[in-house]
Image (cartoon, coloured by chain):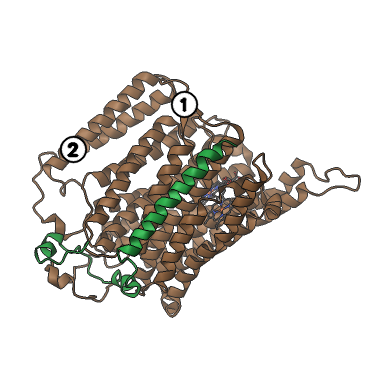
Chain colours: A brown, B green
Amino acid sequence: MMQRLTGAERQLALIISVLTLLSGLAMAAAGRADPLGIHGWIVVLFAGAVFLLTLGSIYDPEPREDRAVSYYDDPTKVGLILALGWAVVGMGMGVWVAAQLAWPDLRFDAAWSSFGRIRPVHTSGVIFGFGGNALIATSFHVMQRTSRARLAGHVSPWFVLLGFNLFCIIAASGYLMGVTQSKEYAEPEWYADIWLVIVWVVYFVLYIRTLARRNEPHIYVANWYYLAFILVVAVLHIVNNLAVPASLTGAKSYSAFSGVQDAMTQWWYGHNAVAFFLTAGFLGMLYYFLPKRAERPIYSYRLSILSFWGITFFYIWAGSHHLHYTALPQWVQTLGMTFSVMLLVPSWASAGNALMTLNGAWHKVRDDATLRFMMVAAVFYGLSTFEGSFMAVRAVNSLSHYTDWTVGHVHAGAMGWVALISFGSIYAVVPLLWQRETMYSWKLVEWHFWLALSGTVIYVFAMWNSGITQGLMWRTYTESGTLAYSFTDTLVAMHPYYVARAVGGALFLTGAVLALFNVVMTIRHAPEKRPERDYPTSSEATEPAVPAAE
Amino acid sequence: MEILMLLIPLTLAMGCVGLLTFFWTVRSGQYDDPEGDARRILQADDRPLDYRQSERRGERTT
Ligand code: HEM
Ligand code: HEM
């Protein structure tokens, strides 16, 4: 990890880890027995580990290679493995949460294992731990390849990656201790939020600086999606997390907004977290890895750019569809609903563009599970955006809101789209980065594909059934005008679907475990691939396409 | 709904940043050759163009 850093860079890394360690100590001293203090010790441990790792190689020889002639892939490699590790943890938690809903005794009577605490460990674990690491790692890969330039920095990518993971650890461990600011997908408290701002600014600067040194005049469309993801998430995160700490010696803080104002800010954030975290960044992945894997240019490049600007301008106005029939003024709800329906156009443009790219290469989709992951992801992207636009219509939302239909929609997007495109991209990029012929076992990739697909389908169908049953039971009246069903009746009706969901989730989780195993075995055992030729001179490098060897 | 006094201007400001960026992309010729742009990422050679070398030859474009 360290051999490619110069002495000065290693010293810089050392200084940063010392500073982080000191702030951890300060948190521990201020917080004492409060969760803030425990988080302080976690920071000390994390920064201390980085410090020792750096110190161990501080006197190693300077790198001798000319660094400008190769890409800097070490942070990408570590990021991909972290993503898979978080996938297993986060999805494992998801299965546990699902099982608790079917069999509440699985809480085992501890405070930390109660539904309200492990549910955010699941959501943050999969969205930020798995999704976030996959986004950061692939963005490092894509920005270098499409710019044909090396990363603009050797310490900052590590800072971004490790700093982000420190944030995830603080978040997950905090939930288990009961730390939360009760904002969905933004649960971590003020100190974690401040840390994430620093990490995120470094990420943005790194991206811009790498683009600035590009050797390719055009900025490939995937970069725009990644950039929108970074920039918009930064703004949303800062505004939604404006809060006043109750004291500087404790974790608790109070939001700067209250009541419906707070709800509007939260869903302005929440919906755009969906839009720019769970959608834009992953579209960046899709637009790079799908054409690469299919070895075909994107069907319509113009359309991909058009859908980018469409999504950027529409998504941000749609958040209020999460607050239909609330104290929010009617016109704000209608505004959100209108933009949500308009969103279908750029969303389907992307999904259609991806599928049209594969049109004519269906034999590849049939033979190659990696490409099939990406194809099915595009289908689920189309499906979940259609469903979302439909659910945003107020009349439909009156049935779907507060029911499992929403959860079904979430997981059609999260498992079918976000997770599948990430797995596909990981399988595409791992052999390339570690210079292997192929993945260790293509059969396992095939197994993973079918496990993931069947898991998603079982999950989503179970929730559609459960949600619509629940919604209809809630609005059924007897002849005398009273409610026909009690709340408990609906729970009994939902139980079989909850069992089915847990089973589907377990299949999906099994697939993720296979993926981690397969990647580790690829790194350790797959036969190495010799580069086609040794370091080309620049003039050779500009020559068109050497045939791809996948 | 005072919060909208913050959220709407902020959202509009973000939209304007987007719009300005879009104008920049048009003016700097980002859309001159979509066909080529889509194809160039498929080149198999997985190495950066050494920018110092290309700079020496005066080929660097920004
Ligand atoms: C192994 C697969 C998975 C299982 C078993 C699972 C299970 C669950 C369960 C039981 C809930 C709580 C539902 C409720 O409160 O009624 C939930 C919520 C959620 N999960 Fe998953 N999940 C899985 C995968 C994923 C993935 C891959 C993602 C994202 C990339 C994700 C994102 C979410 C989100 C955002 C919520 C909150 C939904 C809401 O508030 O409406 N899940 N999941
Ligand atoms: C055109 C695109 C989309 C639209 C218009 C849309 C619309 C909606 C609507 C109306 C809800 C229900 C709000 C409620 O009743 O509480 C919702 C919930 C949700 N959607 Fe979507 N959706 C879209 C795409 C997606 C995608 C692609 C994903 C994920 C990967 C996603 C993730 C979520 C999540 C996580 C929630 C649950 C939020 C919560 O209550 O915790 N959506 N969406």
The kind of residue tagged 1 is Val
* Residue with the mark numbered 1: A244
Asked which quadrant contains residue A366, the reply is bottom left
- The numbered disc on residue A91 is none
Q: CB atoms at circles 1 and 2 under 8 Å apart?
A: no
Report the mark closest to the observer, 1 or 2: 1
Dot 1 falls on a residue whose secondary structure is: strand
Which chain is mark 1 on? Answer: A
Residue at the extreme bottom of the image, as rendered: A360
Is residue A102 visible to us here?
yes
Who is closer to the viewer here, A53 or A547? A547
Report the label total: 2
* Placement of A440 over or under A506, stated as above or below: below
Q: Nearer the viewer, residue B5 or A367?
A: B5
Lateral position of residue A479 relative to residue A105, left or right = right
In the image, is A516 to the left or to the right of A258?
A: left
**Residue designated by label 2:** A12
Residue at the spot 16% in from the left edge and 46% down from the top edge: A5
Give residue A13's quadrant in the image: top left
Label 1 and label 2: CA atoms lie apart by 33 Å
- Viewer-proximal residue among A370 and A166: A166
Q: Alpha-carbon neighbours of circle 1 within 10 Å: few (<14), some, or many (≥20)?
A: few
Chain label for disc 2: A
The mark nearer the N terminus, 1 or 2, is 2
Looking at the rendered structure, the kind of residue marked 2 is Leu
Residue A268's x, y, as percent?
53, 44
Secondary element type, mark 2:
helix
Residue A220: in sight, yes or no? Answer: no
